[in-house]
């Protein structure tokens, strides 16, 4: 039982890591591209890398933190414009091929030995050369700290208590999912509760908070308050996830957001209504790209800027996360990314613990987890293209 | 008892014989237990112990092309010599030190082959007299990078012409091999509309199977090439049967299908890593002899590979142009609904295309591993995937002959970028930049028709 709890603990830790938050923001940008507008951008990692470079290089050249972030965002705007200008008038797969190529070009250029004074070449930019500017902003103080003052450890509940907490957590999550489903479709065992919208929303919020509290009760994680891997980084990262969600929500319910969906569903119809499809697509590409760049900055703030760590693979992970959570759903990116990262660590941990070494070595469990991810992505797209939260009708489009 | 010991009667040797036998058996077992161990091992093998000692070891040259007989010297902080070793056939050297800190490693230039020199380290790693600064931590092995290049690597003037001609030949070689894979990619796109991101893994699969058959199982190379091509073609057939045809029947959108290929590609890459590991594996152990014509030096194998590609591509072209199957394929590529209405079995044609495409990619993969990348690794295919897409798009999406021309152009661009001044990895980037520029002026590609672009 301890092994299982340990593995679960590790996956929760991964799920709330600042890198995960960074990817969530990038996936939110991808959601604007792919989910809402139907643009097939396979170069989101390129946007992330550009944002990360923009910020890190600005800081190492002496700019302040805020200016550095602005520089990173501006670079992404320019990049999106360059990508979009030749391709947005063409069929969708041209954008796909150009974005993936452009992302690779950025990676190759970043690795160039000639640019080593700025980008650090293939070694990358070490975190310690730009993190101080970020850590300096912290008002969390020193020392370390666990989010919940009471947890199963301080109460001395031991394995039994933890197991009960874990079961409780699962029960709450299941209830949450059932309620959400009942609210959406009006069917199921909780349909009566869901019929009254106000009550349902309150119950939903309570369950959500309960999940969060139980999570930290069952998996107590203690980090430094500040530092490069502390609560400060996590708080800022997830705060910006919240901000991004809010921005997306406001954008999507605006008239402009409806125009996006219009472009996704039927370009010709939009054109006949007098909308400039090209401009709308370009705006979507730029805004999603800015989210990507910002996500890249959050992604690297707790580690280092390494060109090879932000290649195609990362874009593919972003797609898996987006489709898992549900494209064209506001909360899809958050749910998908945390589940994706948590699940991968879970699979790896379980494989390492329960599959004998003679069948699968330590290195192989890592690869095994990625094989599962790849096959999972295929099965997901085939059998549940709308993901967990998405709406199937919204994903009939073709780029 | 004074019988002479003979085979079959080891008893006669008494106790000594028995011990010798056991020792031989144990030795044999040890050899079996270490299948990867090469015949030549370094005499000064070093294992660091935590807090006690550290190692500075590495290879002069690189693993595929090590330098034998180079004198490597280790100096301590005060530039006093700690030790000097001479590399063996595997180019490896190793020092053991018992103090952490800064050391300098240098190679005696006189001990290198006449036409080779050590690549000077970057400024911040530059020690006295062109030596390399290494920082040693106890309990760890530090690996200084001592790579070599040819003395006239920067050949200017007359040398440039020679280099350009050599690069053109290499570019044609790369282009022909890329063409093998990209024709299939283009045909799949033409008949189904699908951009297959897993096509690169078909290329890797070819190389990997080549490694399995020719290196591990020791099959004859030519037999291996044929078998690999056939097996790869079979995987294409099976893929269409199990995956793509049912998905087409379900009416899954092209975007969704594209993402399925991304998932497939990811799963395949890690499956390769799972079974073979992350290292480069050679398809055949021995290196090939080369020949020189004028300014061009090429291995015979390269020439054969180019010949095979040309013949196979010619064959595909013939089938497409002059046979009924080819005619049907082009018809499906043009308009599947109309083709079906005129009595063509579209599903059969598409299955044939998948089979041929996978077979061609596999053949391209094993040849690529033999003559270009000098071995196969889990991501070999992924590295050329974008070149394949560039070739296909450049020639015009969905046109087989466009893919061929595009591949040749991309091959030439990639190989010529180096001598014309593009540093290192940027040669791949140059190909992609050309692709983007071309899309600006002629989005339908060289051989595509303007009406095909949305």
Image (spheres, coloured by chain):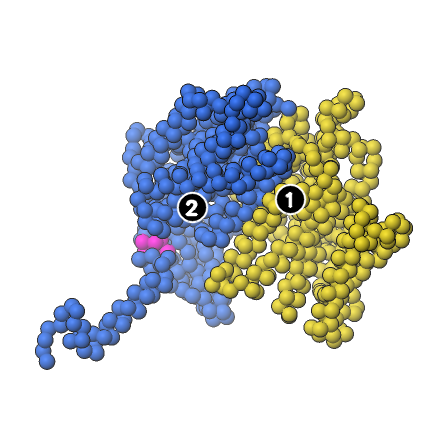
Chain colours: A yellow, B blue
Label 2 vs label 1: CA separation? 31 Å
Residue hosting label 2: B208
Quadrant in the rendering for residue B21: bottom left
Which percent across, then down, holds residue A312?
58, 42
Q: Magenta-highlighted stretch: main secondary structure?
A: loop
Residue hosting label 1: A383
**Residues flagged by tags 2 and 1 on a common chain:** no
Where are the magenta residues, as a range? B87-92
What element does badge 2 sit on? Answer: helix
Q: Can residue A245 be seen in this view?
A: yes
Quadrant in the rendering for residue A45: top right
Q: Which residue is drawn at 59% across and 38% down?
A: B247
The correct choice, above or below, for A74 with respect to B405 in the image is: below
Which percent across, then down, holds residue B227?
37, 41
Classify residue A360 as left or right of residue B60: right
Q: Which residue is drawn at 20% across and 74% down?
A: B17
Q: How crowded is mark 1: few (under 14 residues within 10 Å), some or many (20 or more)?
A: few
Which percent across, then down, holds residue A39?
68, 34
């Amino acid at each position: 039982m301890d092994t299982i709890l340990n593995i679960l603990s590790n996956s929760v830790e991964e799920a709330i890591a600042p890198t995960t938050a960074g990817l969530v923001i990038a996936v939110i940008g991808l959601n604007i591209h792919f989910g809402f507008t139907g643009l097939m951008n396979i170069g989101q990692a390129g946007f992330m890398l550009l944002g990360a470079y923009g910020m890190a290089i600005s800081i190492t050249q002496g700019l302040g933190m805020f200016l550095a972030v602005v520089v990173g965002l501006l670079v992404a705007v320019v990049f999106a414009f360059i990508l979009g200008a030749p391709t947005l008038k063409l069929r969708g797969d041209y954008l796909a091929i150009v974005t993936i190529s452009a992302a690779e070009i950025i990676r190759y250029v970043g690795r160039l030995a000639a640019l080593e004074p700025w980008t650090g070449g293939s070694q990358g930019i070490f975190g310690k050369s730009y993190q101080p500017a970020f850590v300096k902003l912290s008002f969390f103080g020193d020392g370390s700290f666990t989010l919940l003052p009471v947890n199963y450890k301080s109460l001395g509940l031991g394995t039994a208590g933890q197991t009960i907490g874990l079961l409780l957590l699962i029960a709450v999550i299941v209830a949450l999912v059932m309620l959400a489903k009942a609210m959406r479709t009006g069917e199921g065992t909780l349909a009566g509760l869901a019929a009254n919208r106000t009550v349902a929303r309150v119950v939903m919020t309570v369950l959500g908070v309960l999940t969060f509290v139980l999570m930290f009760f069952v998996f107590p994680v203690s980090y430094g308050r500040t530092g490069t891997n502390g609560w400060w980084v996590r708080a800022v990262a997830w705060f910006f996830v919240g901000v991004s969600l809010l921005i997306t929500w406001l954008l999507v319910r605006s008239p402009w957001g409806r125009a996006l969906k219009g472009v996704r569903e039927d370009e010709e119809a939009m054109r006949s209504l007098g909308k400039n499809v090209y401009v709308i697509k370009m705006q979507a590409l730029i805004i999603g790209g800015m989210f990507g760049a910002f996500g890249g900055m959050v992604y690297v703030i707790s580690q280092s800027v390494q060109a090879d760590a932000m290649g195609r693979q990362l874009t593919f992970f972003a797609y898996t996360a987006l489709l898992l959570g549900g494209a064209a759903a506001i909360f899809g990116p958050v749910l998908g990314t945390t589940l994706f990262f948590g699940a991968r660590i879970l699979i790896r941990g379980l494989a390492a613990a329960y599959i004998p070494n003679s069948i699968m070595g330590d290195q192989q469990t890592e690869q095994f987890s990625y094989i599962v991810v790849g096959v999972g992505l295929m099965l997901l797209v085939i059998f549940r293209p709308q993901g967990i939260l998405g709406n199937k009708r919204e994903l009939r489009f073709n780029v | 008892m004074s019988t002479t010991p003979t085979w079959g009667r080891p008893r006669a040797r008494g106790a000594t014989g028995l011990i010798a036998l056991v020792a031989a058996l144990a030795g044999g077992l040890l050899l079996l237990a270490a299948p990867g161990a090469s015949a030549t091992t370094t005499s000064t093998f070093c294992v660091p112990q935590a807090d006690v000692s550290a190692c500075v070891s590495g290879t002069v040259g690189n693993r595929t092309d090590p330098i034998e007989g180079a004198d490597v010297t280790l100096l301590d902080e005060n530039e006093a010599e700690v030790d000097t070793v001479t590399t063996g056939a595997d180019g490896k050297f190793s020092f053991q030190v018992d103090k952490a800190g800064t050391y300098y490693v240098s190679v005696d230039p006189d001990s290198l082959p006449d036409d080779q020199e050590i690549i000077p380290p970057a400024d911040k790693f530059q020690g006295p007299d062109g030596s390399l600064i290494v920082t040693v931590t106890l309990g760890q092995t530090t690996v200084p990078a001592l790579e070599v290049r040819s003395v006239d690597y920067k050949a200017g003037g007359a040398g440039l012409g020679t280099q350009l001609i050599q690069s053109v030949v290499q570019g044609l070689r790369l282009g022909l091999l890329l063409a093998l894979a990209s024709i299939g990619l283009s045909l799949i796109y033409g008949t189904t509309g699908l951009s297959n991101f897993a096509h690169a893994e078909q290329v890797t699969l070819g190389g990997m199977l080549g490694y399995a058959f020719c290196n591990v199982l020791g099959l004859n190379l030519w037999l291996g090439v044929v078998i690999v091509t056939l097996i790869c073609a079979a995987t294409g057939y099976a893929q269409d049967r199990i995956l793509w045809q049912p998905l087409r029947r379900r009416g899954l959108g092209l975007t969704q299908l594209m993402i399925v290929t991304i998932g497939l590609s990811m799963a395949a890459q890690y499956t390769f890593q799972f079974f073979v590991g992350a290292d480069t594996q050679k398809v055949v152990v021995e290196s090939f002899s080369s020949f020189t014509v004028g300014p061009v030096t090429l291995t015979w194998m390269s020439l054969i590979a180019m010949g095979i590609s040309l013949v196979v591509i010619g064959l595909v072209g013939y089938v497409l142009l002059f046979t009924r199957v080819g005619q049907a394929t082009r018809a499906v590529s043009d308009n599947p609904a109309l083709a079906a209405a005129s009595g063509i079995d579209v599903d059969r044609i598409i299955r044939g295309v998948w089979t041929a495409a996978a077979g061609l990619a596999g053949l391209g993969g094993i040849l690529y591993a033999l003559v270009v990348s000098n071995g196969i690794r889990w991501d070999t295919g992924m590295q050329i995937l974008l070149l394949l897409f560039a070739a296909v798009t450049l020639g015009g999406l969905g046109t087989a002959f466009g893919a061929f021309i595009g591949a040749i152009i991309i091959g030439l661009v990639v190989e010529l970028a180096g001598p014309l001044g593009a540093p290192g990895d940027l040669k791949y980037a140059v190909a992609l930049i050309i692709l983007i520029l071309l899309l600006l002026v002629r989005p339908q590609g060289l051989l595509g028709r303007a009406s095909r672009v949305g």
